[in-house]
Image (spheres, helix red, strand yellow):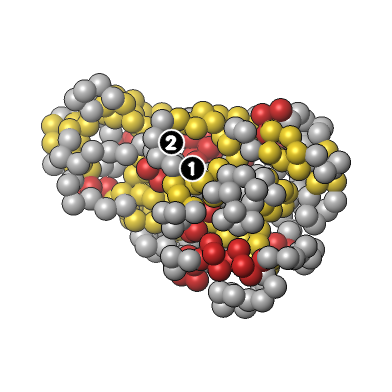
Amino acid sequence: MISAIAKPTASIPVFRARDLTCVHGANEGDDLTFADELMLDDSYWFAEAARQVRLGIASSESGAITVGEDTEAGTPGASLHLDSCVTVMSPDGTTTEVLLLVEVDMFGDAAAVYALPLAPLSPRTDYTLVGIDIDGAARKFAEVACVSFTRGTRITLASGAQRRIEKLAIGDRVLTRDNGVQEIRWIGHSTVRAVGDFAPIVIRAGALNNEADLVVSPDHRLFIYQREDAIGAGRRELLVKARHLVNGDTVIQQDGGFVEYYQLLFDGHEIIYAEGIAAETLLVDTRTRAALPPELDEVLARKLPGHEDRAHLQFEVQKALLDQPDAADVLREASRRTGGRRAG
């Protein structure tokens, strides 16, 4: 099996179980719970006062998932179990998938249940439970965790030419920031609803010295080298999540419709150039591994040690340092007229 990765941490937008209460059926009066205790055709009421919180997620070398240190919910270090993917249906017939995660205490008992809707839920609405999927939950969760580029994104090749991501093929040689020319080992492709927290981030032309718009998944991390430490990170080399740069102007979240996402896998976790911006490729870890075809576990297991030990993985900047309306402008100016230097 491809080994699990101890870093980086991530966070996902979840609701607490109490935000979805059963109002009709076998579990009437109970909060949303894990698959073993759920009953099809039960109806759940989505609370009007419900508020999503960020649940920190960390991966361990053993393959376990725990609550991360940077979290708004749960106990840091507590075990997390990906329980199931349930499907609920609103009165108008619209269905929504919801991932259920269970926080487990030191005695092995369920301490909390969290719901991660894959599309927005409407308050003051009855949702009927119409499906419970345990086997497919890991893949759904992996698709959420994967960093992705969108159709049309131009990737810089070894030759310096740029090619649209949908035209790339396995074996194509791509320019990386830290390791020269590397071949693509796998390309993932999916079409998902571009709604809520899962809507893509648009980094408009010029926002980070890019010539054209770059559109990526919300947690996609961009690599920025500053001439000087402009945001107080204590270093010049930064990994910045796209969603932390949203300012409603030069960086926006594009909500609505569907989006085609592409994932690029290399032997190592690389920094490549997309629309001229240095950006990360897919990192294989406990969260994302289920998105890969099963045969990759056997074929590439010995070829992916580079996903475990990359110096640039230590460079991620927390949101607090970017919590200013001009963060993108500050980073753009800090990175002007630099060629950057190699990480590590």
Does 271 sit left or right of 15 as displayed? right
Counting from the top left corner in percent of width and height, residue 9 is at 54, 58
Q: Is residue 339 above or below residue 149?
A: below
Most foreground residue, 125 or 68: 125
Residue flagged by tag 1: what amino acid is it? Pro
Name which residue lies at 68% across and 34% down. Answer: 165
| Residue 218 visible in rendering | yes
Q: Is residue 22 above or below residue 240?
A: above
Q: Quadrant of the C terminus?
A: bottom right
Q: Which residue is mark 1?
A: 200
Q: Which residue is mark 2?
A: 194
Mark before the other along the chain sequence, 1 or 2: 2
**Cβ–Cβ below 8 Å for labels 1 and 2?**
yes
Name which residue lies at 70% across and 73% down. Answer: 227
Counting from the top left corner in percent of width and height, residue 213 is at 58, 44
Most foreground residue, 105 or 56: 56
Q: Quadrant of the N terminus?
A: top right
Q: Is residue 326 above or below residue 210?
A: below
Counting from the top left corner in percent of width and height, residue 174 is at 80, 42
Tell me where residue 33 sits by quadrant.
top left
Which mark identifies residue 219?
none
Residue flagged by tag 2: what amino acid is it? Ala
| Residue 4 visible in rendering | no
Q: Secondary structure at mark 1?
A: loop
Name which residue lies at 18% across and 51% down. Answer: 49
Are there few (<14), some (14-19), or many (20+) residues within 10 Å of tag 2? many
Counting from the top left corner in percent of width and height, residue 259 is at 50, 32
Are there few (<14), some (14-19), or many (20+) residues within 10 Å of tag 1? many
Does 226 sit left or right of 9 as displayed? right
